[in-house]
Protein backbone atom coordinates (compact mmCIF):
# COMPACT_ATOMS: atom_id res chain seq x y z
CA UNK A 1 0.00 0.00 0.00
CA UNK A 2 1.28 3.47 -0.88
CA UNK A 3 1.74 6.19 1.73
CA UNK A 4 -1.06 8.20 0.08
CA UNK A 5 -3.49 5.28 0.34
CA UNK A 6 -2.56 4.72 3.99
CA UNK A 7 -3.14 8.41 4.80
CA UNK A 8 -6.54 8.34 3.05
CA UNK A 9 -7.61 5.32 5.10
CA UNK A 10 -6.32 6.96 8.31
CA UNK A 11 -8.21 10.15 7.44
CA UNK A 12 -11.43 8.18 6.88
CA UNK A 13 -11.06 6.39 10.23
CA UNK A 14 -10.36 9.58 12.16
CA UNK A 15 -13.25 11.45 10.53
CA UNK A 16 -15.60 8.56 11.35
CA UNK A 17 -14.43 8.47 14.99
CA UNK A 18 -14.54 12.23 15.56
CA UNK A 19 -17.49 13.24 13.39
CA UNK A 20 -19.61 10.10 13.30
CA UNK A 21 -22.14 10.11 10.45
CA UNK A 22 -21.32 13.73 9.55
CA UNK A 23 -17.61 12.89 9.49
CA UNK A 24 -18.20 9.99 7.11
CA UNK A 25 -20.28 12.20 4.83
CA UNK A 26 -17.57 14.87 4.96
CA UNK A 27 -14.98 12.28 3.92
CA UNK A 28 -17.07 11.27 0.91
CA UNK A 29 -17.50 15.00 0.17
CA UNK A 30 -13.71 15.36 -0.05
CA UNK A 31 -13.45 12.32 -2.32
CA UNK A 32 -16.26 13.50 -4.60
CA UNK A 33 -14.75 16.98 -4.85
CA UNK A 34 -11.39 15.48 -5.79
CA UNK A 35 -13.08 13.48 -8.56
CA UNK A 36 -14.91 16.62 -9.74
CA UNK A 37 -11.63 18.56 -9.97
CA UNK A 38 -10.04 15.77 -12.01
CA UNK A 39 -13.10 15.73 -14.26
CA UNK A 40 -12.89 19.51 -14.73
CA UNK A 41 -9.24 19.21 -15.81
CA UNK A 42 -10.10 16.39 -18.22
CA UNK A 43 -13.02 18.28 -19.79
CA UNK A 44 -10.89 21.42 -20.25
CA UNK A 45 -8.10 19.35 -21.86
CA UNK A 46 -10.66 17.88 -24.28
CA UNK A 47 -11.46 21.38 -25.51
CA UNK A 48 -14.88 21.98 -23.92
CA UNK A 49 -15.93 25.55 -23.13
CA UNK A 50 -14.19 26.65 -19.93
CA UNK A 51 -16.87 29.19 -18.84
CA UNK A 52 -19.62 26.57 -19.30
CA UNK A 53 -17.63 24.00 -17.30
CA UNK A 54 -17.13 26.56 -14.52
CA UNK A 55 -20.84 27.46 -14.41
CA UNK A 56 -21.78 23.79 -14.15
CA UNK A 57 -19.20 22.61 -11.64
CA UNK A 58 -19.25 25.53 -9.17
CA UNK A 59 -22.80 24.69 -7.94
CA UNK A 60 -21.94 20.96 -7.98
CA UNK A 61 -18.91 21.54 -5.78
CA UNK A 62 -20.88 23.76 -3.41
CA UNK A 63 -23.55 21.08 -3.08
CA UNK A 64 -21.02 18.36 -2.26
CA UNK A 65 -19.03 20.58 0.12
CA UNK A 66 -21.98 22.03 2.04
CA UNK A 67 -24.81 19.49 1.95
CA UNK A 68 -22.63 16.41 2.46
CA UNK A 69 -20.52 18.11 5.13
CA UNK A 70 -23.38 19.61 7.17
CA UNK A 71 -25.90 17.71 9.31
CA UNK A 72 -28.52 20.49 9.45
CA UNK A 73 -30.59 21.29 6.34
CA UNK A 74 -31.25 24.89 7.42
CA UNK A 75 -27.52 25.55 7.78
CA UNK A 76 -26.78 23.84 4.45
CA UNK A 77 -29.49 25.72 2.53
CA UNK A 78 -28.51 29.12 3.95
CA UNK A 79 -24.80 28.45 3.37
CA UNK A 80 -25.41 27.32 -0.21
CA UNK A 81 -27.40 30.42 -1.18
CA UNK A 82 -24.94 32.78 0.52
CA UNK A 83 -21.91 31.08 -1.06
CA UNK A 84 -23.46 31.03 -4.54
CA UNK A 85 -24.40 34.74 -4.43
CA UNK A 86 -20.95 35.73 -3.14
CA UNK A 87 -19.17 33.62 -5.76
CA UNK A 88 -21.22 35.20 -8.54
CA UNK A 89 -20.24 38.66 -7.29
CA UNK A 90 -16.59 37.72 -6.80
CA UNK A 91 -16.49 36.07 -10.25
CA UNK A 92 -17.34 39.39 -11.91
CA UNK A 93 -14.46 40.97 -9.98
CA UNK A 94 -12.13 38.10 -10.88
CA UNK A 95 -12.86 38.40 -14.60
CA UNK A 96 -12.10 42.13 -14.59
CA UNK A 97 -8.94 41.95 -12.47
CA UNK A 98 -7.50 38.92 -14.30
CA UNK A 99 -7.96 40.78 -17.59
CA UNK A 100 -6.20 43.86 -16.23
CA UNK A 101 -3.41 41.90 -14.50
CA UNK A 102 -2.42 40.01 -17.68
CA UNK A 103 -0.78 37.39 -15.45
CA UNK A 104 -2.29 34.32 -17.07
CA UNK A 105 -0.09 31.68 -18.64
CA UNK A 106 3.27 30.14 -17.85
CA UNK A 107 5.97 32.00 -15.94
CA UNK A 108 9.64 32.22 -16.85
CA UNK A 109 10.37 29.59 -14.16
CA UNK A 110 8.78 26.94 -16.39
CA UNK A 111 10.98 27.80 -19.37
CA UNK A 112 13.56 25.05 -18.95
CA UNK A 113 10.97 22.38 -18.11
CA UNK A 114 8.91 23.15 -21.22
CA UNK A 115 11.90 23.67 -23.52
CA UNK A 116 11.08 22.12 -26.88
CA UNK A 117 7.33 21.93 -26.16
CA UNK A 118 4.62 24.21 -27.46
CA UNK A 119 3.36 26.73 -24.89
CA UNK A 120 0.23 27.41 -26.96
CA UNK A 121 -2.04 24.39 -26.31
CA UNK A 122 -5.06 25.94 -28.05
CA UNK A 123 -6.96 26.94 -24.89
CA UNK A 124 -7.32 30.33 -23.25
CA UNK A 125 -4.92 30.80 -20.34
CA UNK A 126 -6.99 33.78 -19.17
CA UNK A 127 -10.16 31.66 -18.92
CA UNK A 128 -8.22 28.97 -17.06
CA UNK A 129 -6.87 31.55 -14.60
CA UNK A 130 -10.43 32.77 -13.92
CA UNK A 131 -11.62 29.19 -13.30
CA UNK A 132 -8.69 28.46 -10.98
CA UNK A 133 -9.37 31.66 -9.01
CA UNK A 134 -13.09 30.88 -8.65
CA UNK A 135 -12.44 27.31 -7.47
CA UNK A 136 -9.75 28.55 -5.07
CA UNK A 137 -12.10 31.11 -3.50
CA UNK A 138 -14.96 28.61 -3.37
CA UNK A 139 -13.58 26.62 -0.44
CA UNK A 140 -12.95 29.66 1.77
CA UNK A 141 -16.37 31.14 0.99
CA UNK A 142 -18.23 27.87 1.70
CA UNK A 143 -16.33 27.36 4.97
CA UNK A 144 -17.15 30.88 6.16
CA UNK A 145 -20.84 30.51 5.22
CA UNK A 146 -21.18 27.22 7.12
CA UNK A 147 -19.36 28.61 10.18
CA UNK A 148 -21.58 31.68 10.37
CA UNK A 149 -24.82 29.79 9.70
CA UNK A 150 -24.02 27.03 12.22
CA UNK A 151 -23.10 29.50 14.96
CA UNK A 152 -26.22 31.61 14.49
CA UNK A 153 -28.52 28.60 14.29
CA UNK A 154 -27.18 27.22 17.58
CA UNK A 155 -27.62 30.67 19.14
CA UNK A 156 -31.20 30.78 17.88
CA UNK A 157 -31.89 27.35 19.35
CA UNK A 158 -30.42 28.40 22.70
CA UNK A 159 -32.33 31.72 22.71
CA UNK A 160 -35.53 31.26 20.65
CA UNK A 161 -36.78 34.77 21.50
CA UNK A 162 -33.65 36.55 20.27
CA UNK A 163 -34.48 39.50 18.00
CA UNK A 164 -33.37 39.81 14.39
CA UNK A 165 -30.98 42.73 14.96
CA UNK A 166 -29.40 40.88 17.89
CA UNK A 167 -28.91 37.85 15.68
CA UNK A 168 -27.24 40.01 13.02
CA UNK A 169 -24.99 41.57 15.66
CA UNK A 170 -23.99 38.11 16.88
CA UNK A 171 -23.27 37.14 13.27
CA UNK A 172 -20.78 40.00 12.98
CA UNK A 173 -19.14 38.94 16.27
CA UNK A 174 -18.75 35.38 15.00
CA UNK A 175 -17.58 36.75 11.65
CA UNK A 176 -14.64 38.59 13.22
CA UNK A 177 -13.26 35.29 14.51
CA UNK A 178 -14.00 33.48 11.26
CA UNK A 179 -12.27 36.23 9.28
CA UNK A 180 -9.15 36.04 11.45
CA UNK A 181 -8.77 32.27 11.14
CA UNK A 182 -9.66 32.29 7.43
CA UNK A 183 -7.04 34.96 6.72
CA UNK A 184 -4.34 33.02 8.55
CA UNK A 185 -5.31 29.77 6.83
CA UNK A 186 -5.24 31.33 3.35
CA UNK A 187 -2.04 33.35 3.82
CA UNK A 188 -0.02 30.61 5.51
CA UNK A 189 -1.28 28.07 3.01
CA UNK A 190 0.14 30.31 0.29
CA UNK A 191 3.49 30.64 2.07
CA UNK A 192 3.65 26.90 2.68
CA UNK A 193 3.03 25.98 -0.95
CA UNK A 194 5.25 28.79 -2.26
CA UNK A 195 8.24 28.33 0.06
CA UNK A 196 10.36 26.75 -2.66
CA UNK A 197 9.51 29.61 -5.03
CA UNK A 198 10.47 32.19 -2.40
CA UNK A 199 13.82 30.40 -2.06
CA UNK A 200 14.16 30.63 -5.84
CA UNK A 201 13.56 34.38 -5.67
CA UNK A 202 16.11 34.78 -2.88
CA UNK A 203 18.88 32.63 -4.39
CA UNK A 204 18.52 34.30 -7.79
CA UNK A 205 18.52 37.79 -6.18
CA UNK A 206 15.15 38.88 -7.53
CA UNK A 207 14.41 42.53 -6.87
CA UNK A 208 11.13 43.56 -5.25
CA UNK A 209 9.89 44.83 -8.61
CA UNK A 210 10.68 41.51 -10.30
CA UNK A 211 8.85 39.56 -7.58
CA UNK A 212 5.63 41.58 -7.71
CA UNK A 213 5.63 41.34 -11.50
CA UNK A 214 6.26 37.61 -11.61
CA UNK A 215 3.26 35.69 -13.01
CA UNK A 216 3.31 32.91 -10.42
CA UNK A 217 3.49 35.32 -7.49
CA UNK A 218 0.85 37.68 -8.93
CA UNK A 219 -1.62 34.85 -9.57
CA UNK A 220 -1.18 33.44 -6.05
CA UNK A 221 -1.47 36.89 -4.45
CA UNK A 222 -4.64 37.63 -6.43
CA UNK A 223 -6.20 34.32 -5.39
CA UNK A 224 -5.55 35.23 -1.75
CA UNK A 225 -7.25 38.59 -2.25
CA UNK A 226 -10.26 37.00 -4.00
CA UNK A 227 -10.65 34.49 -1.16
CA UNK A 228 -10.44 37.17 1.53
CA UNK A 229 -12.94 39.41 -0.27
CA UNK A 230 -15.25 36.43 -0.64
CA UNK A 231 -15.08 35.72 3.10
CA UNK A 232 -15.70 39.41 3.87
CA UNK A 233 -18.84 39.40 1.72
CA UNK A 234 -20.01 36.05 3.06
CA UNK A 235 -20.08 37.13 6.73
CA UNK A 236 -22.82 39.81 6.45
CA UNK A 237 -24.75 38.01 3.70
CA UNK A 238 -24.94 34.65 5.51
CA UNK A 239 -25.94 36.43 8.75
CA UNK A 240 -28.63 38.44 6.94
CA UNK A 241 -30.10 35.45 5.08
CA UNK A 242 -30.26 33.29 8.20
CA UNK A 243 -31.75 36.06 10.36
CA UNK A 244 -34.40 36.83 7.72
CA UNK A 245 -35.12 33.14 7.23
CA UNK A 246 -35.57 32.59 10.96
CA UNK A 247 -37.87 35.61 11.27
CA UNK A 248 -39.94 34.43 8.31
CA UNK A 249 -40.24 30.90 9.71
CA UNK A 250 -41.30 32.29 13.08
CA UNK A 251 -43.95 34.51 11.47
CA UNK A 252 -45.27 31.63 9.34
CA UNK A 253 -45.45 29.36 12.39
CA UNK A 254 -47.30 32.05 14.33
CA UNK A 255 -49.76 32.65 11.48
CA UNK A 256 -50.29 28.91 11.14
CA UNK A 257 -51.12 28.56 14.82
CA UNK A 258 -53.58 31.44 14.65
CA UNK A 259 -55.24 29.87 11.59
CA UNK A 260 -55.58 26.54 13.40
CA UNK A 261 -57.16 28.24 16.42
CA UNK A 262 -59.62 30.08 14.16
CA UNK A 263 -60.63 26.78 12.51
CA UNK A 264 -61.10 25.13 15.89
CA UNK A 265 -63.37 27.98 17.04
Image (cartoon, rainbow, N blue to C red):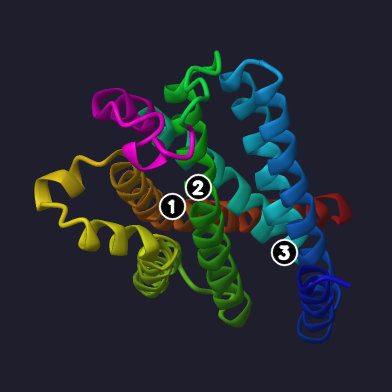
Residue segment shown in magenta: 93-114
In the orientation shown, which residue stands out farthest toward the front? 116
Of the two numbered discs 2 and 1 in the rendering, the one whose residue sits closer to the viewer = 2
In front of the other: 123 or 137: 123
Q: CA distance from mark 3 to mark 2?
A: 20 Å
Name the residue rendered at 25%, 41% in the picture. Answer: 214
Determine whether the residue tagged by mark 2 lies in a helix, strand or loop.
helix
Determine whether the residue tagged by mark 1 lies in a helix, strand or loop.
helix
96 inside magenta stretch: yes
In front of the other: 13 or 177: 13
The quadrant of the picture occupied by the N terminus is bottom right
Disc 2, disc 1: CB below 8 Å?
Answer: no
Q: Residues within 10 Å of mark 3 (few under 14, many from 20)?
A: many
| Quarter of the image where one finds residue 204 | bottom left
Q: How many marks?
A: 3
Give the residue number, with chain letter if any, for mark 2: 136
Name the residue rendered at 85%, 75% in the picture. Answer: 9
Give the residue number, with chain letter if any, for mark 3: 70
Name the residue rendered at 74%, 54% in the picture. Answer: 67
Give the residue number, with chain letter if any, for mark 1: 234
Point out which mark residue 206 bears.
none
> Percent x, y for residue 161?
54, 74
Q: Is residue 251 left or right of residue 13?
A: left
Amino acid sequence: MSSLGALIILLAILMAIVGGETGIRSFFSVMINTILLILVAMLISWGLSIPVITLIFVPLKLVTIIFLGTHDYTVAKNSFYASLIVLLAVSVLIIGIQHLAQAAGLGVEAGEILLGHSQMPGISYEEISVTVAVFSALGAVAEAAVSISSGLLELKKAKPEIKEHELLKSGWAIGYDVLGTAMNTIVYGMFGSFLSLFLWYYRLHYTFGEIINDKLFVNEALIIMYSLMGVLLTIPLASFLLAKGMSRSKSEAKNGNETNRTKEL
